[in-house]
Image (cartoon, grey):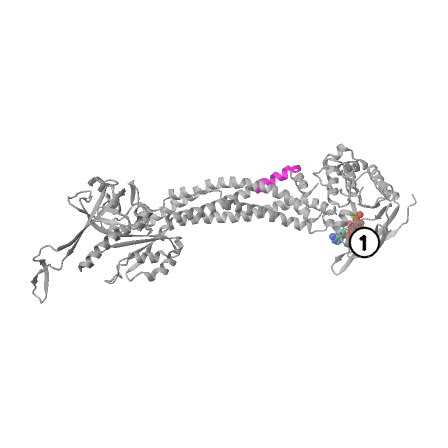
Amino acid sequence: MNVFKRGLISIVRRPGKSAILFILILVLSNIIAGAISVKNALVNTENAILEKMGVEVTIEYNWLDITDATPSITPEMVETIGQSEYVKEYDYSTTYYMEARGVKNYYSDYYYDGNGSFTITGGRNTTLQDVRSGDITIKEGRTYTREEIESGAPVLLISDKVAQLNDLSVGSSVTFLYTLYDYSDIVYRKYAAEGDFDIPVLPIEPWEPKVIKTFEFEFKIIGIFSAKPMRYTDWNGNIVETDSPLLNTFYTVNKAINACINEIRKEAQAAGVPDNIYINTAAVFILKHPDYVELFESQNKQHLPKGLVFKNNAKSFESIRTPMANVEWIAEIVMWVAVGATVLIISLLVTLFLRDRRHEMGIYLALGARKGAIVTQILTEVLVVALIAVTLSVFTGNLLASNMSATMLENQLTEEQKNETDGGRDVIPFSDIGISSSKSIGILPVPIEEEDTGRITTEDVMEMYKVRLDLKTVLFIYLIGMGSVLISTLVPIIYTLRLKPRQILM
Amino acid sequence: MPNILSVRNLNYYYQDGDTRRFILRDVSYDFERGRFYVILGESGSGKTTFLSMIAALDTPKSGEILFEGVDIRRIGYENYRRNKAGMVFQSYNLIPYMTAVENVLVAMSITQNKLPADKKETAYNLLQYVGIDKAKANRTVNKLSGGEQQRVAIARAVATDVDLILADEPTGNLDEETEAGIVEIFKSLAHDYNKCVIVVTHSSEIAAQADEVIRLKKGVFLNDGQFSG
Ligand SMILES: Nc1ncnc2c1ncn2[C@@H]1O[C@H](COP(=O)(O)OP(=O)(O)OP(=O)(O)O)[C@@H](O)[C@H]1O
Ligand SMILES: [Mg+2]
């Protein structure tokens, strides 16, 4: 009769005691399993959210510090900063303004015939920033591919409104026009002012500048998007909805815009005239983790000329992180209290359990059994029971935890969002931050309050929040559950075996 | 051939502040195979103390215990308990949730002495020898009477094929009739199986059956000599 058989006999012949031990370990390890599951789920959710949203840093003009020498943001500048180890991905967008032959602008209240001028916004990633932020949605066709980005293919995405107005669809072509003029021949009539200086006011002969060249750039439409209306509060305090200024924006790849501009510049240079082209580049850097914001900004400040500054949306994570951190904190406390309580209660229970085994251990000692064999036997008994209980609790604890913690988290999130609205906390909506410089070109009023398109809602978090059984969680539950049982069993056994058999038996 | 058990200058005391309260003082004695010894003494005279020394359940303060001429410390207490001596307690000390035969088998699985191949059969036979039939042998021991339990305990002590059987007031909790039966087993073990049986008691009835009676008084052994049967 070996030690394992003895252990088994002991479990089976004393069903009451085994059951008590089993139930107790089950209850306690349920709490541990639940707390660990919740904690892991929260960490996973937070990571998933951070992964999904990323913290965004943009380059903006600091209007207080701007000088004539302040250059615009250049692609080179963006490429350099984009190499930082804190950057997960980056994007920049070149925006230019050109006429499109026979294409009319769309305005909700009026439109006119003739060539319309359009904002052309470039991109560097297959996901358009304005799509990401939720400002526009691809309705038909597709976005550009990596190959098109690399090659600078003249592809175009236009709004549904412009498409409808101009009878354009996926596959149609749009030709952009640019005329390079030579103004050098124009002579201005000079009014002699009362002072000593002349003011050039009106051109006299020739009336028109000389045309050097009219460029035509043909682009192919690959996609149609719809733009989300903007909301703002008017003077009377009413919320008014208007068309998005992005309706008159065309999206293409950066390289396609640069190709056009380079062509124009080359010609201007050859003709010896200034090109007068002012392009606007907006950049966004998505960091690997919100905690990197300060490191990233101080690391790359040197690359920004005076007048340009970094701006980030790290603050907007607070509304998600705070409630998650709260629940995480509770879960952590519950976990350690449960671990502590389990170790304590199991120790007491096992000590009690081993009290009537004390005599038995004395008998084994008197019969000359090795201490190792006695330890093995008792451990086998307790651990077999514990193993079944802990295994069961991995599933039941998970089940309990997912129901309870989800409710808890949801309440916390709702609470936090209520506080935010009440306290008027300064939270930057994501949609304000992406590349949307084109918006400011619009003639529409600047939106006062926009709908929080890019913001993570309670629903988003709850959708991502899943108490799942990953291997790490399961192992951790076993480690803590079995570990505490093991320790609390070993201590009283060793205490007993340290005694002389006579002290136990006689 | 050396005596199976020799005790030399055995001392045991409890430290009482500065003074030592001696329980055993310079005890020396030789025990032989094939004899049934009884140690008599008043309550508190140190009988259990002595027995637990020679059973290696406790350690003396000084002196030596030789088993077949070898100090039991050299044999190792665990080895000695496992392979050399069988102990019978006043309170039986059986494992309560196991059957009689399982209790015997536990001891048989712990010893390293060479035992017959069919341990279970041997265990049943031994139990039969001490008066436990097969039906009782298959009962958990807490469903046996005190006398029956003590018989099981004796079977367990001899099951490991040891030559030294030690018993601490084995009949202390039993009636006279049962006591007589148990004593018969001890006598038989000594005389029929050539074992050395040492029984501690304060029963003069048992003493009357012994081959040799030792009186323990004030920590020393007084040999009454042989009761001439
Ligand atoms: N832990 C202890 N501390 C101090 N004294 C003790 C301790 N254990 C036993 N004693 C004393 O040692 C003496 C011998 O005890 P022992 O158990 O050997 O007596 P005994 O002869 O077996 O008595 P009994 O016939 O009642 O069983 C007793 O006087 C007892 O009070
Ligand atoms: Mg005693």
Q: Quick check: A51 left or right of B165? A: left
Residue B107: quadrant of the picture: top right
Give x and y (percent) for residue A276.
19, 57
Residue at the disc numbered 1: B70
A24 is within the stretch colored magenta: yes
Letter of the chain that mark 1 sits on in the rendering: B
Q: Quadrant of the C terminus of chain B?
A: top right
Q: Quick check: A208 left or right of B7? A: left
Q: Of helix, strand and loop, which one carries label 1?
A: strand
Judged from this view, the residue extending furthest toward the bottom is A196
Asked if B24 appears above or below B95 in the picture, the reply is below
Within 10 Å of disc 1 (Cα), the crowding (few <14, some 14-19, many 20+) is some
Residue in the foreground of this view, choosing between A452 and A155: A155
Name the residue: 20% across, 41% down.
A166
Residue B126 in view (yes/no): yes
Task: Name the dominant secondary structure of the magenta segment.
Answer: helix
A60 is within the stretch colored magenta: no
Question: What are the residue bounds of the magenta stretch?
Answer: A12-25
Q: Amino acid at mark 1?
A: Val
Asked if A213 appears above or below B34 in the picture, the reply is below
Q: Quick check: B31 left or right of A472? A: right
Judged from this view, the residue extending furthest toward the front is A270
Give x and y (percent) for residue A308.
29, 59
